[in-house]
């Protein structure tokens, strides 16, 4: 007799499972089911079976439906999510359901996906590929591919280029191609892999060391500047691991839509292994489809953003985390997990290697790779370094700082930078200007009384968006018209003050009227393919100057780009956030790495008021190692992470008195529960008010991670039970990145 009671995880904010009767339906652990809950129906996941319940059996309700055609979620995945939910103090059911593709949270069977397949029409078959203008390179390639094979699916088009679908649609519009719906499957292209370069000594060593221990758990930190050939190392490791039948590899990337080149490179170098991507830019049905291909084992290479760390992968043999220092691996709401930390746990449980790659590793990782555990035991991670650029001709860029207090600025630009831009235009080379502020200018200032336009809902200033004649809050999205008069003194002399991407773009257009300029920031890149289109234009030499935020810093490879200008990043030098300088250094190393990737030498010009700051000194010599060691020494002296382990109890409410009452309670409770954890008084974060909510937090700090975990579990369950807790929005943030 099977046990009659089902233990089911539901997407509700209670940290427990719910009891139901099977109702005669056959289910397995990990199966998706539909259950009555209150007056509604909910999707749940079966977690176990029991003979007894804490509730009277006659009161239990039967489940209404079991989605028996779907593969159940495997025990390993369930256990990993359970571990995460416990570690980050988040209700398991919510953690589990939110790790699934949206389609699996909806009350409907997860049907397999249809997609379009393209083929040439009778007319199209009579056309020669030369008929397509040379400029339309992608269209030409798509057309040639259609001539070579009968049909191409959308997935196959993606393998040609990220804009290939658009090109195919254009061919349909011309009457040269037609499309029809077919069942989505996964195929690989039958083409020879792209030629592979001969590894240099450092790369060879890295590949050898990791492959020697490919059958065990070990974390490897692959430290190498941009262009040193880390991706090439990943590819060789992937080839090695995939040679084993059925093996799967998970590659985590910070934001996949910003790195289309990486996916294209994997596809061209590993063409025989089915590859899927998992990220939020996919349609819901694409995401489900890709997830199912991963879960069934059909997909061998899975490239995904942080959430994909929870994807069921029956044969996972290697995890690679590219740009491991990137803060987008940390989720900043609901379950505040860090995908890198979860990856380490997952790899350890599966006894497989995990490779963390970066030019500027997170200090936590650097510490783990360099600090000796004790006299007998070396560091926790293996450290592998690539110290040269892989292409021998490619030299490191020359980095110089220009003291903005010593020269006359023209609309915020130094004469040196302007001259360098002109030189690039004359040489038909490309430039990139990096400024980490979108909009026209960061503040609107009254010249008479020094009033500054504030956001009423946040502790922040409104940013001027001149094009739309709006003031906009970048924290809550609040928007208003630009006032004609100062609301404080009535004066009409209101000035946009300071520079953002829009203003820089405008200034450049005035200074360099012949230059073709493109702006890349969240305002200009709201459409799905906008970035890809701009990057294509840059590659086709249709752009001379790129202006943009950190969106531009990531992994794009432009061989003809030889100048990088950095405009005013000084505020980060003096930020109260102790991680600000670590982050700025990483960002600037990354943008600097954009200059001079091929055979042309690069130049980087940094405009700053503090040219002698140690951060810039380290940057000039591209010396991550000594800068990281210096920062670590500081952290050790003041006892900051990674030398201590922290957690925040965050709270917010319309009324600060409620926040205070809750945090005071949390503070007193925590203090009464342990001596092993330092409990700080409630304080307000730097952003005191956000989206109309008053905020505060209590910081918990311990020298040993287990002490913190021992406190958190009982603390959180007591807090949940307390009546003040219902009046505020509160959350626990373990290993917080932002304060
Ligand atoms: P990273 O990922 O560290 O930025 P990549 O792997 O992208 O570096 O390498 C930078 C460039 O050098 C790429 O164009 C790559 O094809 C090339 N490359 C990498 N390794 C080698 C090598 N051993 N010999 C020649 N070229 C290489
Ligand atoms: Zn005024
Ligand atoms: Zn706001």
Image (cartoon, grey):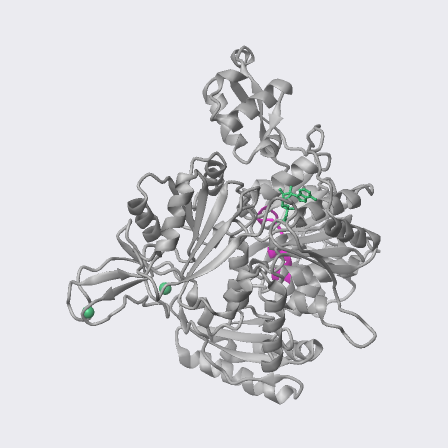
Q: Is 229 above or below relative to 270?
A: below
Residue 332 seen in render: no
Instruction: Point out the stretch of residues depicted in magenta.
Output: 93-104
Q: Which residue sits at x=21%, y=60%?
A: 483
* Viewer-proximal residue among 693 and 419: 419
Query: Which x, y percent locates residue 706?
Result: 71, 77
Q: Quadrant of ligand 3?
A: bottom left
Q: Is residue 42 left or right of residue 131?
A: right
Residue 245: say if magenta.
no
Q: Quadrant of residue 330?
A: bottom right
Q: From the image, give the main secondary structure of the stretch colored magenta.
A: helix
Query: Which x, y percent locates residue 44?
Result: 64, 55
Residue 47 seen in render: yes
* Viewer-proximal residue among 722 and 391: 391
* Viewer-proximal residue among 375 and 401: 401
Query: Which x, y percent locates residue 471?
Result: 29, 58
Query: Which x, y percent locates residue 131?
Result: 49, 16
Q: Quadrant of residue 387?
A: bottom right
Q: Is residue 702 left or right of residue 481?
A: right
Q: Which residue sits at x=54%, y=55%?
A: 590
Q: Quadrant of residue 209?
A: bottom right
Total marks shown come to 0
Q: Is residue 551 left or right of residue 27?
A: left
Instruction: For the N terminus, give its image quadrant.
Output: bottom right
């Amino acid at each position: 007799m099977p046990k009659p009671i089902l233990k089911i995880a539901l997407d509700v904010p209670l940290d427990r499972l719910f009891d139901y009767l099977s109702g005669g339906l056959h289910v397995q652990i990990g199966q998706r089911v539909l259950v009555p809950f209150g007056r509604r129906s909910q999707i749940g996941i079966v977690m176990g079976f029991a003979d007894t319940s804490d509730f009277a059996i006659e009161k239990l309700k039967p489940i209404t439906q079991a989605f028996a055609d779907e593969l159940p979620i495997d025990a390993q995945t369930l256990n990993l999510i359970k571990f995460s939910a416990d570690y980050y103090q988040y209700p398991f059911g919510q953690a589990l359901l939110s790790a699934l593709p949206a389609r699996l949270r909806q009350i409907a069977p997860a049907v397999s996906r249809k997609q379009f397949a393209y083929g040439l029409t009778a007319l199209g078959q009579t056309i020669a590929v030369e008929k397509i203008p040379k400029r339309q390179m992608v269209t030409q390639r798509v057309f040639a591919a259609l001539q070579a094979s009968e049909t191409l699916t959308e997935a196959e088009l993606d393998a040609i280029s990220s804009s290939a679908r658009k090109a195919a649609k254009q061919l349909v519009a011309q009457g040269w191609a037609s499309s029809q719906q077919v069942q989505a499957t996964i195929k690989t292209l039958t083409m020879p892999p792209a030629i592979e370069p001969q590894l240099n000594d450092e790369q060879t060593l890295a590949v050898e060391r990791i492959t020697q221990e490919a059958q065990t758990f070990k974390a490897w930190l692959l430290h190498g500047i941009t262009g040193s050939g880390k991706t090439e190392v990943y590819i060789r490791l992937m080839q090695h691991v995939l040679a084993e039948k059925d093996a799967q590899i998970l590659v985590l990337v910070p934001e996949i839509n910003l790195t289309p080149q990486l996916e294209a490179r994997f596809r061209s170098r590993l063409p025989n292994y089915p590859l899927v991507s998992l990220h939020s830019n996919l349609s819901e049905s694409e995401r489900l489809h890709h997830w199912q291909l991963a879960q069934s084992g059909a997909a061998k290479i899975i490239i995904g953003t942080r959430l994909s760390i929870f994807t069921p992968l029956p044969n996972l043999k290697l995890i690679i985390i590219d740009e491991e220092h990137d803060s987008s691996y940390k989720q900043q709401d609901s379950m505040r997990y860090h995908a890198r930390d979860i990856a380490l746990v997952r790899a350890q449980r599966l006894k497989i290697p995990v490779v963390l790659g970066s030019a500027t590793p997170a200090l936590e990782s650097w510490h783990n790779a360099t600090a000796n555990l004790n006299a007998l035991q070396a560091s926790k991670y293996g450290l592998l370094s690539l110290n040269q650029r892989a292409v021998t001709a490619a030299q490191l860029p020359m980095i110089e700082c220009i003291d903005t207090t010593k020269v006359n600025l023209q609309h915020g630009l130094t004469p040196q930078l302007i001259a360098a831009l002109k030189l690039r235009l004359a040489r038909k080379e490309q430039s990139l200007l990096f400024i980490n502020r979108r909009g026209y200018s960061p503040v609107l200032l009254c010249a008479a009384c020094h009033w500054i336009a504030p956001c009423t809902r946040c502790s922040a200033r409104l940013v001027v968006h001149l094009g739309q004649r709006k003031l906009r809050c970048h924290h809550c999205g609040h928007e208003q018209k630009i006032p004609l008069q100062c609301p404080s003194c009535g004066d009409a002399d209101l000035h946009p003050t300071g520079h953002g991407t829009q203003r820089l773009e405008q200034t450049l257009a005035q200074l360099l009227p012949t230059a073709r300029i493109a702006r890349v920031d969240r305002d200009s890149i709201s459409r799905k393919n906008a970035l890809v289109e701009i990057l294509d234009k840059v590659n086709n030499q249709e752009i001379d100057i790129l202006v943009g935020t950190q969106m531009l810093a990531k992994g794009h490879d432009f061989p003809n780009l030889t100048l990088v200008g950095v405009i005013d990043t000084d505020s980060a030098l003096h930020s109260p956030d102790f991680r600000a300088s670590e982050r700025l250094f990483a960002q600037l190393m990354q943008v600097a790495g954009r200059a001079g990737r091929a055979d042309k030498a690069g130049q980087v010009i940094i405009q700053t008021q503090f040219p002698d700051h140690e951060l810039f000194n380290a940057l000039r010599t591209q010396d991550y190692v000594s800068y990281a060691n210096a920062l670590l020494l500081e952290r050790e002296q003041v006892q900051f992470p990674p030398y201590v382990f922290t957690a925040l109890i965050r709270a917010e409410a319309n009324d600060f008195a409620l926040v205070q009452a809750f945090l005071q309670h949390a503070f007193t409770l925590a203090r009464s529960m342990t001596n092993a954890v330092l409990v700080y008084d409630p304080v307000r974060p730097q952003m005191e008010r956000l989206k109309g909510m008053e905020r505060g937090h209590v910081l918990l700090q311990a020298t040993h991670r287990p002490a913190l975990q021992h406190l958190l579990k009982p603390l959180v369950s007591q807090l949940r039970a307390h009546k003040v807790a219902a009046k505020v929005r509160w959350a626990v943030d373990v290993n917080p990145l932002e304060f």
